Image (spheres, rainbow, N blue to C red):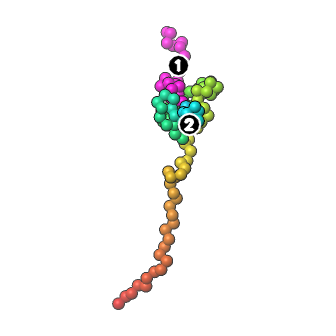
């Protein structure tokens, strides 16, 4: 009977753990590159993949009150809730196909 009266949290525990552990940290007295506080890996333009997947799952499963509370405490940021990745820039951008120019000169057909 006690299990029926307990509140069920829809957010999985691994999500909360990953959001708590994987945070950005600046090296070299706050002037260096961003690194993950927990694993020390380089913090990319999308953050850490583990934090990104945890934030995605949190956004899908958390109730609105939980989202507001997490934003107020700083556990997640607005950037974590941006589920759409920005378009890649630089070398990774796919170039549009170039129009194939037709032959400028046609050779005359010689029939013998």
Residue 3 is one of the magenta-drawn residues = yes
- Residue labelled with disc 2: 32
Question: Taking 45 as reference, is 103 above or below it?
Answer: below
Residue beneath the point at 47% across and 25% down? 14
Q: Quadrant of residue 26?
A: top right
Structural crowding at the residue carrying mark 1, measured as other residues with C-alpha within 10 Å and reported as few (<14), some (14–19) or many (≥20)? few
Q: How many marks?
A: 2
Residue beneath the point at 51% across and 26% down? 21
Residue 16 is one of the magenta-drawn residues = yes
Disc 2 element: loop
Q: Position of residue 61 (x, y in %)?
A: 54, 28
Q: Judge by depth and name the residue closer to the eye, 32 or 48.
A: 32
Furthest residue toward left = 112
Q: Which mark is residue 23?
A: none
Stretch in magenta: 1-24
Q: Judge by depth and name the residue closer to the eye, 25 or 99.
A: 25
Q: Which mark is residue 8?
A: 1
Furthest residue toward front = 28
Residue beneath the point at 49% across and 37% down? 42
Question: Taking 29 as reference, is 13 above or below it?
Answer: above
Q: Quadrant of residue 59?
A: top right
* For marks 2 and 1 on the same chain, the one whose residue lies earlier in the sequence: 1
Q: Position of residue 98 (x, y in %)?
A: 51, 64
Q: Position of residue 24 (x, y in %)?
A: 55, 32
Disc 1 element: loop
Q: Is the Cβ of the residue at disc 2 closer than 8 Å to that at disc 1?
A: no
Structural crowding at the residue carrying mark 2, measured as other residues with C-alpha within 10 Å and reported as few (<14), some (14–19) or many (≥20)? few
Q: Quadrant of the C terminus?
A: bottom left
Measured Cα–Cα span from mark 2 to mark 1: 42 Å
Q: Position of residue 23 (x, y in %)?
A: 54, 30
């Amino acid at each position: 009977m006690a299990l029926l009266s307990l509140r069920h949290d829809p957010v999985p525990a691994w999500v909360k753990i990953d959001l708590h552990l994987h945070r950005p940290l600046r090296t070299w007295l706050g002037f260096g590159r961003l690194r993950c506080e927990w694993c020390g890996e380089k913090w990319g333009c999308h953050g850490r993949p583990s934090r990104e997947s945890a934030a995605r799952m949190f956004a899908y499963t958390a109730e609105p009150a939980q989202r507001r509370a997490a934003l107020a405490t700083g556990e997640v940021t607005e950037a974590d809730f941006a589920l759409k990745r920005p378009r890649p820039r630089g070398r990774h951008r796919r170039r549009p196909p170039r129009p194939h120019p037709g032959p400028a000169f046609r050779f005359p057909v010689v029939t013998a």
